[in-house]
Amino acid sequence: MPLPTETTPNGYVKRWWKEAVVYQVYPRSFYDSNGDGIGDLRGIIEKLDHIKGLGVDVIWLSPHFDSPNADNGYDIREYRKVGAEFGTMQDFDDLLTAIKAAGMRLIIDLVVNHTSDEHEWFVESRSSYNNPKRDYYIWSEHKPNDWPSIFGGPAWTQSPGGDWYLHLFDPKQPDLNWDNPEVRVEVYDIMRFWLDKGVDGFRMDVIPFISKDKTFPNLPEDLRAKPQYLYTTGPHVHDYLHEMNTEVLQQYDVMTVGEAFGVTLQDTPKFVDERRQELDMVFQFAAVEVDRGPDGRWKPWTLPQLKAVFTRQDKALDHHGWPTMFLSNHDNPRIVSRYGDDRPEWREKSAMLLATLILTMKGTPFIYQGDELGLTNRTFTHIDQFNDLWTKNAWQDEVENGPCSEADFFANQNKVSRDHARMPMPWTAQGGFTTGQAWFALNPNFTEINAESSQTIYRFYADLIALRHAEPALVYGDYSDLAPAHPHLFTYTRTLGDTTFLICLNFSVEITAFESGVESEPVLSNYASPFGPMRGWEARIYKV
Ligand code: TEU
Ligand code: CA
């Protein structure tokens, strides 16, 4: 595809995916159309008006492939097959047609750092030393080093044959050997299969992990709690991404966003500088790690720390790279409980304020399903209430075989658990997700907090998206934080040519004195009569 060349006054090449707003669907928990308790593809078709009504441009669908679901679909057994619980390939084609008919695009999850151990490649690979697929995975006669799995425990598991295989995640997620050119050809074929159906790109799961240092050095002591910062620095990661780009991606008009879990800000341009032809964008994790300590457990955070993250991220890329903006996904707690205030009197206002932040920052915004309804975390009190293998492993490591008390464990997990985001969508005051038994319990607060009761938040998201679409300065404008040290006001500008927007967000319940210096009224606010001091969780957007 020839690249577009039209540029903005501040030097960005205009691309459709820079102007897009993305909505992430976690299909298992979106809507169940057939009463088996599991969200499915026809369920997304039935609820497409909900997504379309927001005005978003792109849907990112979390894995919909055939999988034994050790990690809820991030362990793929067959890449060209729809998971039976989600429906059929016909359902997928119908979903894609419906999304296009609604004027939107679809990106899917590309999970190719690892497969399921039930993938036929792995079944063959482990069957004998001289199987042709042996070299599709990473085998060693001895356990070569001390690398830990991201999910806890060692990253090497001994197979019944005696050899050890590498899995940077669960033992049921063996890592592919990208140094084998046959593996890369297989991956590119899978990508073409979906692109030829009309899919508009990929979110790429832990893609910077694909290249391994085959000298297998031990993990440096300072990376013990964050091995991801080693796993993203394999010797050929950029060769492989460039090859993927030239072999496949360049032949289509698509967008790519890589999950840059463990990529430093300094290394980020190597993945997204457009002149390098690798990825369009990556997800940077500093904002969602603002409340994590060096040991990965929850710690309190402050607004100046969060603001500093955005400024650092902005400075890390020049106009040859394009950022993303997100505060949540299926791996993170609910934003209102985390960055806002989920008490009943503040939930709505703080949800609207966070929407304002997400949709007025530089970078393609990603909204996670349910955040447009201001959904909250729940309080888990028993290990059986969790589904996520990451939490279950932590229970074993920290409580059953470690020094952590149960009270400490729940205090931490109630802050960090990935399951907060994975509870089924509450469509009505009766739940409304399924007519059967949900695969995972809804948040018990669904009687109060659901799609019907949260329309004010939903409509505010729609208003913000419409404003972003109408105002190039909110997409391409330069970013500047006006008061980095203020403890609860976040005030910043977005400037493009002679248009400037001033965004003022009060991250607290305190009434705070504030002079906008702007004569006109805000173009959008989560309060009526937005004048004078900023009230609790008030958000205002001024056009200067
Ligand atoms: O996530 C990568 C990842 O390492 C995170 O799950 C991380 O462990 C978590 O955010 C801790 O805060 C991707 C997928 O998004 C995730 O769902 C999968 O479990 C994982 O890869 C393995 O495929
Ligand atoms: Ca179903």
Image (cartoon, helix red, strand yellow):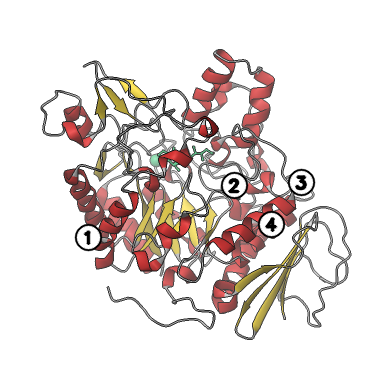
* SS class, disc 3: loop
Please state which of the two labelled residues, at mark 3 or mark 4, is closer to the viewer.
Answer: 4
The CA span between labels 2 and 3 is: 24 Å
Tell me which label, 4 or 2, sits earlier in the chain. 2
Mark 4 crowd level (few <14, some 14–19, many ≥20, 10 Å Cα):
many
Compared with 202, 222 (above or below) is above
Q: Nearer the viewer, mark 4 or mark 2?
A: 4
Disc 3/disc 4 C-alpha distance (Å) = 26 Å
- Where is residue 192 drawn, in percent x and y? 22, 57
Whether residue 388 is visible: no
> Which of pointers 3 and 1 lies earlier in the amino acid sequence?
1
> Is the CB–ligand 1 distance for label 2 below 8 Å?
yes
Kindly check if marks 4 and 1 are in contact, taking CB atoms under 8 A apart as contact: no
User: Closer to the N terminus: mark 3 or mark 4?
Assistant: 4
Q: Is residue 130 left or right of residue 114?
A: left
In-image side of 180 versus 510 (left or right):
left
Whichever of labels 2 and 3 marks the residue nearer the N terminus, that label is 2
Spatial separation of the CA atoms under disc 4 and disc 1: 39 Å
- Image-quadrant location for residue 485: bottom right
Q: Which mark is residue 307?
A: 4
Tag 2, which secondary structure?
loop
Amino acid type for the residue under numbered disc 4: Lys
Camera-near label (2 vs 3) is 2
**Residue under pointer 1:** 247
The mark that comes first in sequence, 4 or 1, is 1
Residue 344 tag number: 3
